[in-house]
Image (cartoon, rainbow, N blue to C red):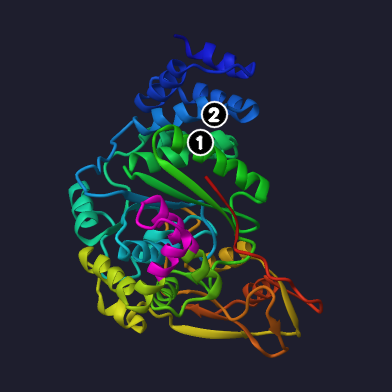
Amino acid sequence: MRFVDIINKKRYNQELTDQEIQFFVDGVTDGSIPDYQSSALLMAIVLNGMNERETAYLAKAMMNSGDVIDLTSIEGIKADKHSTGGVGDKTSMALGPLVAACGLKVAKMSGRGLGHTGGTLDKLESIEGFNCYLTEEEFKKQVAEVGIAIIGQTGDLVPADKKLYALRDVTGTVESIPLIASSIMSKKLASGSDTILLDVKYGEGAFMHTIEDATKLAEAMISIGNSLGRNTMAMITDMNQPLGNTIGNAIEIREAIETLRGHGPKDFTELCMQAAEIMLMQGKVAENKEEARKMLEEVVASGKAFETFKEMVRAQGGNVDMIENPELLPQSKFKTEIKSKESGNVKVLHSERLGVLAMQLGAGRETKEQDVNHAVGIELACKRGDKVNEGDTICIVYHDEELKPQWIDELYHAFELTDEEVAPQPIIEKVLS
């Protein structure tokens, strides 16, 4: 088999066989196919696409390019959840303990933040001593005993994806639904869970800017998961404003704690509850949404959801005192209230701009090598549709260095007010299965 023939085949928009896709993935993994040839095929895929069968087989071949975690020794259905990334997305820290407290096993591998979107691991490492890197055996033991573990990628999972993503990043071939879907799903499938819930975000602060594109990506990932025997569903959710009220690391952990105690922001709480309903039904813990909601409300009211989070933190070496007393979490040197210069209704909160501004404070990283400052970030005092008067606080900035006038000016431009009423918009647009 000659790789140039595979390139030409896709160049002329022809369907690749399973053997040809396997040849490609094997060659990428062992380095026998040069980068320039892999890049040529990636561009042909971007231009001509892949059908459902090709995309599913690409995900499967990538999944099998390295270690695949076997969770069958853990009793019951194991669940996983994946978000395509957004500003203020601290969902895993609240959602995982919520469903685990109801009896569903949650085995989650997460990543770090890059650019304007935060990473779950960075947020969890705000907790003193928290260990994101358990061995596979430790991971499985904790899921079995505590009911939940959230860790960084363990072992040599999906090496083909690491190499392909590095190539895509520098060859203008990132934005392709078959390539994005197979990249995400290969990692989810290799992590070993039985059910997968996808939170596919759309809007200014998301990778997919429109509902239509988010839906196409969700449908592609659902097709991959279901074709490979995993119960896969997706929510299409709004990222045209930050999720919840906080953007950062320690302050997002604090908000997740408040949510588990029943005092979280309305939009974030509702996203977590609806996602939890779906996961409990996928895991056969609840028969319908009503039963699931009742169970969730009970574990919040009884404190069991919060206790489950504490158990996870304790099991992974974290300082539980910080969970019981969130004021012990990392604190910034300075805290500055930003006042509105005008009155009106909040029309737009520019998610991406706010995410970039938080990154510039040190809450995120521009390159993978950079460290994050767990203490800094932005706390919103208003959301879309809220009435704001001149002089009202619109946000609080947690910072370690003096705020530059240009940065403050950019922050003001992230808020748009109008005299007109702003209709509320549901955070979950639709659910797909």
User: Pointer 2: residues within 10 angstroms few (<14), some, or many (20+)?
Assistant: some
Q: Which residues are magenta?
A: 274-296
At label 2, the amino acid type is Glu
Nearer to me, 77 or 201: 77
Q: Position of residue 143 (x, y in %)?
A: 24, 55
Asked if 428 appears above or below 214 in the picture, the reply is below
Residue at the spot 42% in from the left edge and 63% down from the top edge: 292
Quick one: SS at disc 1? helix
Dominant SS in magenta: helix
Residue 183 horizontal/vertical position (percent): 46, 38
Q: Quadrant of residue 15?
A: top right
Say above or below: 149 vs 154.
below
**Marks 2 & 1, CB-CB < 8 Å contact:** yes
Query: Can residue 177 be seen from the camera position used here?
Result: yes
Which residue position is annotated with label 1?
223
Return the residue found at the far right. Answer: 419
Above or below, 8 against 100 in this view is above
Question: From mark 2 to mark 1, how far is it between C-alphas?
Answer: 7 Å
81 sits left or right of 101 in the view: right
Residue 428 located left or right of residue 32: right
Can you identify the residue that label 2 sits on? Answer: 52
Rendered position, 71 above or below 335 = above
Q: Which mark is residue 95?
A: none
Front-lying residue, 169 or 177: 177
The residue lying furthest to the bottom in this view is 391
